[in-house]
Image (spheres, grey):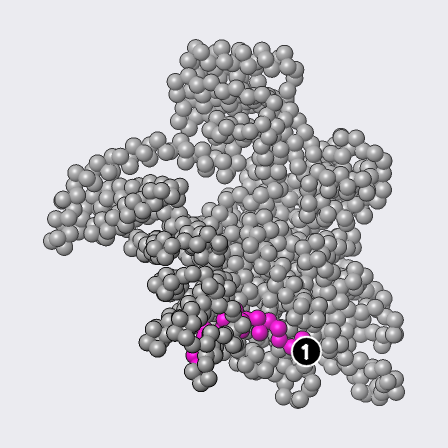
Amino acid sequence: MVSISKTQSNVLSVSAPSLTAASQSSAATATATATGVCITVHGHFYQPPRENPYLDAIERQASASPFHDWNERIDNECYRPNAFARILNDRGEVTGIVNNYEYLSFNIGPTLMSWLERYDPEVYQRILEADRKSCQRLNGHGNAIAQVYNHIIMPLANERDKYTQIRWGIADFRSRFDRNPEGMWLAETAVDYATLEVLAAEGIRFIVLAPSQAERCRPLIGQNQEDQQATDREWHEVGGGQIDPTRPYRCYLKPEMRLMVSNQLSPLSSHYLGRGHGLHSPAPSSNTPYINIFFYDGPISRDMGFNDVLSNSNHLAGRLGQAVRGDHRPAQLISVATDGETFGHHKNSTEKCLAYAFTEEFPRRGWTVTNYAHYLSQNPSTWEVELKPVTAWSCSHGVDRWQDDCGCGGGGGWHLLWRRPLRDTLNWLRDRLIPIYEESGRKLFRDPWKARDEYIDVIRDRSPANVDRFLDRHQSHELDAAEQVDALRLLEMQRHTLLMFTSCGWFFEEVSRPEGVQILRYAARALELAGEVAGIQLEKDFIDRLALIPSNVDCFKTGAEVYRQLVTTAQVSLKQVAAHYAISALFAKYPREQRVYCYQAQQEDFQIQRMGSMTLAVGQLQLTSEITRETEVFVFAAFHLGGWDFHCCIQPFGSRRSYTMLKERLFGVLQEASAAHAILEMVRLFGDQSFSLRDLFAEERHRIVQLLSQENLTRLDQLYTQVYRENYGVMMAFHRDDLQVPVELQVAAEVALGHRCLTAAKALELETEDAESLLAEIEDLATEAGHLRSHLNVPEVKQILERLVWRSLDTLLQAGSGTDQRSPLELEADIRYIERLIAVGDRLSLGLCLDKSQELYFDSLYSQIVPLCLGWLQRKDASAGESAVVPVALGIAPSDGGWELPSIRQLLELGQTLAVDVECWLHQLSRSLVD
């Protein structure tokens, strides 16, 4: 309830939404003590690296349609909804927006965080802000934990790679969250004692594992319990997943444990792992290193992923409540963990369940929402645990899912015989690249392996100044330009060597899936870089080994054919980058300096001439890789014959004189107006190699295809419009008699109306003075389409209207809070304009997504809109000679923004249109008029 006091007993009572901005703040400042029942929900948020190794960008993925790629799609379905999770009332209106990351324990893979930072900075900042707020709420212990860098299976990595993965994960985390991580998530929770040693050595305090990964546990000897009976410390066998997950455990890293693992796991035996034998060892001494381990509740975590536990918050709380121990212990942790993508992507809208549970359901039951680090700080481990030798949460055969035909992840009658030879082949490549890196690296770096461990600083920031600082720090002597290129190539070779072990490549049922192809692309890039630096060619031997990898797909048969068809064809040379630039320059006027993916293109000379339908561009171009700094100057000639026919030639720049002569000769031939002669001259001057439209990178190719199609589409639009106009009366006659309109006429109507609608919407987005008539035109088109029962397929109009609603609302709210006050008529017209935009989108059945506008409105509700209501009520009371209205519970100061009642009411009604709960304030205004 929100109470607003007036004179004596005259009190205004307003039923506020269940979760206002004020109550969210109250929930966020919950007690920072981890006693009683504590709840931790951990989300492992991760996407595999999908970037083209040559372009440092994700290319369009058709399977993710209507989004550009799967990162963008899952961001839209999961990462963003969790950053702005709605709490709804029974009318489906927003009563609160919660940043779930403030309450979730979470890790977000560094490769995914890099993508979010670049492509959705708003969500990225919400994640960082959530960690800061959780630090404030929980005595400095943030919700975020680190992750091994690119999700490799740590027990299958060599020792150097273990260290680099953990150091990169820590450094990446520190650079983002501005603090050291206390915990680290292991890919697939795959663990062995060697990995634990590295984690502890690098300062990681705890990890999270599945209960099935524990072998046995026992109480620790307390500080004053040296004479404790030996029988009190007997081991409890928990190898079947019976470990109590409500407490943390201490896992000691005794030398004999690693020795026993080494002896028993060389080679790794799936048979041995399947028997679940633990590694029994003497009691630890006081100075034995250790790491803390939390085991999540397995059954509840599985239910979250595969059952309906997340269908509503009461159901979730009830299921968690079943795990609460009734033994009156002072503190217990109910901890669950699952893939973060469960919350919204795998299970639609379940982020709402979490938001309400965190801020309402759990506090109502007296439960404290905490994270692992905070709980551990107040409840240190009192039990010791020993682990099974090598385990993971998604394979019941140790880690064979990532190296053998164990059956996990298979299905559809497909075999998994490819996994072992793929692992062996990549291990072989890694081991062959090590001496290349060491021998070449010693000539350039003081310590090549230290340079690799700190290369994450460059991966995070590739600015020239930062790269220079890195090289200054690690170079063995002053490196010239060529040596700098080789140094960066070597480090990139190692980066791609690590990336080729990303776990997803083995996770599914076939080597030719996108995940398998991606790790082979990383391998190909590492091979190429090794050849460029050391002149050692390993690709033939590599392909021979790939030939031993069986594929389930007939058109491939072996991994070698997968490599030839899907990997080799995707490799990119500097010449291809130059060709991409040259053909694109036929349609875009580039400035002197232009970024082309991860390359800097500097235009030294450019000239273009047109002759009828033919266009010829000739130029000189310097390309520089932002990643390796390799630079080359090219001469190009790009010839557009008209339509879809292109002929582009590239060659290294020779001399100014030869370039001038080449240019004069080509433009001279163009004057003959003979395409055949022009192409023959290009072949004579450049040689046989040429590039065409299909050699462009996908994004630019699609853009040019659309440009080339536009003329034909315009003609078709005109034709369909003519057909529609000539037959409008006929179509209406069909509708009057309830007859089905011939499909040809219906299509003509939908194309014609859709074209007009898109044209008007584009103009509306650009125009401000003529906005009224343009919007009226779109409204008329919606009416016309309704009469004809036509559905307009205009997704671009949908996007335009969504942007216009947000932009207009932002302008309105800024005008309402600024010093430049608008008149009531102007304000009411602005609100009515937004309402009309939304309404016409509904009439066109576009399914407008107004989430961002809703977030903007809700964010302003208690900072701007409610104060306007209170300000008006205060002025009304003052004019009636009553004492001023003073807000009591919300802590909101009235605003004397000068808004009149009709405008304020209209602004609140706009909130209803945006599905924001403002009923109590509308009701209060109505009551005040009655009073």
Looking at the rendering, which quadrant does residue 398 occupy?
A: bottom right
Point 70% across, 53% down: residue: 175
Label 1 neighbour load within 10 Å: few <14, some 14-19, many 20+: many
Amino acid under label 1?
Ala
Number of numbered tags placed on the structure image: 1
**Identity of the residue drawn at 70% across and 57% down:** 178
The residue range painted magenta reads 11-33
| 253 up-or-down from 686: above or below | below
Q: Is residue 651 left or right of residue 168?
A: left
Question: Position of 438 compared to 247: left or right?
Answer: right
Label 1, secondary structure: give it.
loop
Between 112 and 388, the residue placed more toward the observer is 112
Disc 1: which residue: 34
Vertical relation: 201 (above or below) 513: below
Q: Position of residue 52 (x, y in %)?
A: 59, 42
Between 80 and 639, the one lying in front of the other is 80
Q: x, y percentage for residue 355?
A: 52, 70
